[in-house]
Image: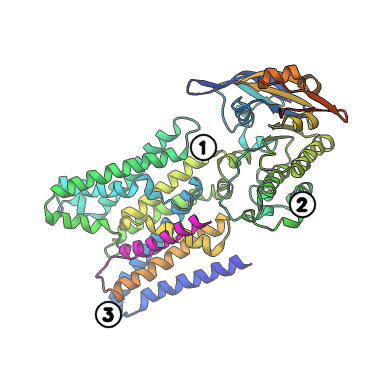
Amino acid sequence: MVEVHSVSKSYGLKAVVDNVSVNIEKGKITSFIGPNGAGKSTLLSIISRLMSADTGEVLIDGQKVKETKSRDLAKKIAILKQSNHLSLRLSVRDLVSFGRFPYSQGKLTKEDQVYIDEAIRYMELEDMQDKYLDQLSGGQKQRAFIAMTIAQDTEYILLDEPLNNLDMKHSVQIMKVLRRLADELGKTILIVIHDINFASVYSDYIVALKDGKIEAQGTVNEIITSLTLKRIYGMDMPIQEINNQKICVYFS
Amino acid sequence: MRDKSKLILLLILAGASIAGYMFIELGPNWDYALPRRAEKIAAIVLTGTVIAIATLLFQTVTNNRILTPSIIGLDSLYMLVQTTLVFFLGSTSMTVMNKQINFAISIGFMVVFALLLYRLLFRREGQNIYFLLLLGLIFGTFFGSFTSFMQVLIDPNEFQIIQDRMFASFNNIQTEVLIMATVLTGVTLLYLTKFVKYLDVLSLGKETAINLGVDYDYTVKRLLVIVAILVSVATALVGPITFLGLLVVNVAYEMFKTYKHFTLIFASALVSIVALAAGQMLVEHVFTFSTQLSVIINFIGGIYFIYLLLRESRT
């Protein structure tokens, strides 16, 4: 379980994350939603030690993130941020292999190769695994990076807007993979996501942030209501039920 | 493996240029010329290796392939130290003319300056590495202006001494200094082996490196200290020469098209040795000492740099 205890972080005078406490359950997909600048990405960065909080602390399985060795954390928690610009000449397989660094420190073993193959298969990258990253489209690159975090074989996977730059087909593909990772392998997945319909259809829990504070949290049924969404986004959204899935119609 | 055969080819090329430098136009007094040439070639191998590795590390840490460590102002500081010494003590004083003392003073100043700069940078958490470059750039310009100011006031005869130091040169190296430099480099490179495995991961960027379990601040701090020591050694030994690093590291990247630093370290060091040894041959036999090696390097390096920029802007 990930426990966030009254975490705050400010840039200058502006509090980006303001006294946030939240518990995230194991083996589920938890989506972080909210307007731009609500502090979702910052919160994810703090949980994954990319940033340190000004006050408060984060515990993963009862261990304080601040006091855990970085290398040990890398076997427990993986984070993928939204912009991944690389100037290196790297093949897809090379990139995915980097996911094994916490275990083998650069010298790949046979066991590592098995994990790498599996991650590549999971993201359906087999036929392009020897291509170089600069030859790929934005979506393919994104999938390669996600494959790297899968190869890292961590219990917790944190993804910051994984659907950026992706078309519907690949968005759905990635969300389905995440669903499988949670259901089949029991991984705990935290994602920051902008499309609330993807959040509604694919996640178990939703945490809504606004102005650095938690505005609402709960199961999909509790959060995806016109009333709650109005509080979060400040706009009216009728909600339709299609095939037992709640779809927000926010286009008008 | 293709990388391996390329490395062997480079090794042969380096050996050939070293041998060429040692034996071409040796003349009848070989028992006099050979030890002197050996000394120079040792300095060339040392400087070449050191500059290449320092630049490679620096580019990896900054994730930028068109930077050289000279941007943190060590070259300018070296010139400032030399000018200040001549300005206050005169060109005939021991401190200026005795190479060992001069070497120690220059290295001392450069390393202490770099450490202070890093302290400033890493005191606050999460500071951007470009802040370091910006600070270094400003300090470098400041040192440069101050140096020119003193050079304008100085006696023209004394200025000659400084002018000599403004260009990297292998023509006047003392054995004692060379030994000091070799020992210092050896210890530093030994320390570097602890961090080599992190270099590939660091080249993926800060966030990915942290995600993969690299203790980022700790590692980068140590790598930057290594860079500072290596650059200081090379500069104090032969003069400002960091531009060479930009040239050879990029040639190594072009030749090997790999991200593996284990290969790149050897490749760029070998390219660097070839460039220096062949360049020095040109200086001695073609230009008969009418120009300095660093002038040739800056000329060729400059053209290559422009080519790089043009090509990058097209893609």
Look at label 2 and name its amino acid.
Answer: Asp
Tell which subunit mark 2 falls on.
Answer: A
| Residue pictured at 56% horizontal, 56% vertical | B262
Q: Which is the main secondary structure of the residues drawn in magenta?
A: helix
Q: Which mark is residue B217?
A: 1
Q: Mark 3 points at which residue?
A: B29
The answer to whether residue A27 is visible is no
B127 in relation to B265, above or below:
above
Residue B202 screen position, x and y as percent: 56, 46
Mark 1, secondary structure of its residue: helix
Tell which tag, 1 or 2, sits nearer the viewer: 2
Look at label 1 and name its amino acid.
Answer: Asp
Q: Mark 2 points at which residue?
A: A117
Marks 1 and 3 in Cβ contact (< 8 Å): no
Magenta stretch holds residue B300: yes
Tell which subunit mark 1 falls on.
Answer: B
**Is B159 left, or right, of A184 in this rendering?**
left
What's the colour scheme?
rainbow
In the image, the segment drawn in magenta is B290-315
In this orientation, which residue lies closer to the viewer: A90 or B292? Answer: A90
Please, which residue is most extreme toward the front here?
A252
- Give the mark nearest the N terminus, 1 or 3: 3
